[in-house]
Amino acid sequence: MADKDMQKELEQLRAEVATLSAARASKKAAADKADTTPKESKPPEVDDSSDIIESAKAAVADDEELKSQFDQLFEQLEYEIKDLPAITTLAVFSLGVLFGRLLR
């Protein structure tokens, strides 16, 4: 009796797989058809290039500020790590490693 139930369930699963495969194939065909339609390209404007240059300069300025913030952060961390006892630091580090392993 269990074999008959398993056979029925197996047939149902095969029918579902066939239905899903057909739906996936039709969706892929529709996506391929949509990709083949020609797209209109907008010609680049002169103003766009000046905007790009200005944004690049702003990014470089932000990058320098970001670097200085990281440098300050590392200096503070170095100072705080030197003040911590070695045993406490090792215990916290090993707990972090164990916790990270358990989360995997």
Image: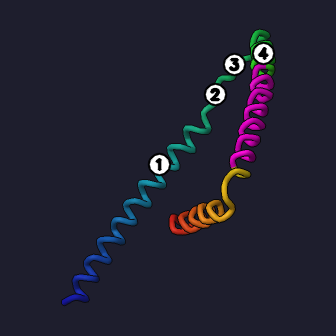
Mark number for residue 54? 4
Q: What element carries label 4?
A: helix
Can you tell which of label 4 and label 3 is closer to the viewer?
A: 4
Residue assigned mark 2:
39
Quarter of the picture holding the N terminus: bottom left
Could you tell me which residue is drawn at 73 percent across and 32 percent down?
69
| 51 up-or-down from 92: above or below | above
Q: How far apart are marks 4 and 3 (CA)?
A: 21 Å
Quick one: label 1, few (<14), some, or many (20+) residues within 10 Å? few
Q: Earlier in the sequence, mark 1 or mark 2?
A: 1
Q: Position of residue 20 (x, y in %)?
A: 40, 59
| 103 up-or-down from 36: above or below | below
Inspect the image, locate mark 2, and give the three-letter code of the amino acid beneath it. Lys
Q: Position of residue 100 (x, y in %)?
A: 56, 63
Residue assigned mark 3:
42
Residue assigned mark 1:
27
Q: Earlier in the sequence, mark 4 or mark 1?
A: 1
Q: Which of marks 4 and 2 is nearer the N terminus?
A: 2
Inspect the image, locate mark 1, and give the three-letter code of the amino acid beneath it. Lys
Residue farthest left in this picture:
1
Is 72 situated left or right of 39 in this image?
right
Quarter of the picture holding the C terminus: bottom right
Q: Is mark 2 on a helix, strand or loop?
A: loop
Q: Does the magenta-highlighted stretch encompass residue 64?
A: yes
Q: Does the magenta-highlighted stretch encompass residue 72?
A: yes
Q: How far apart are marks 1 and 2 (CA)?
A: 20 Å
Can you tell which of label 4 and label 2 is closer to the viewer?
A: 4
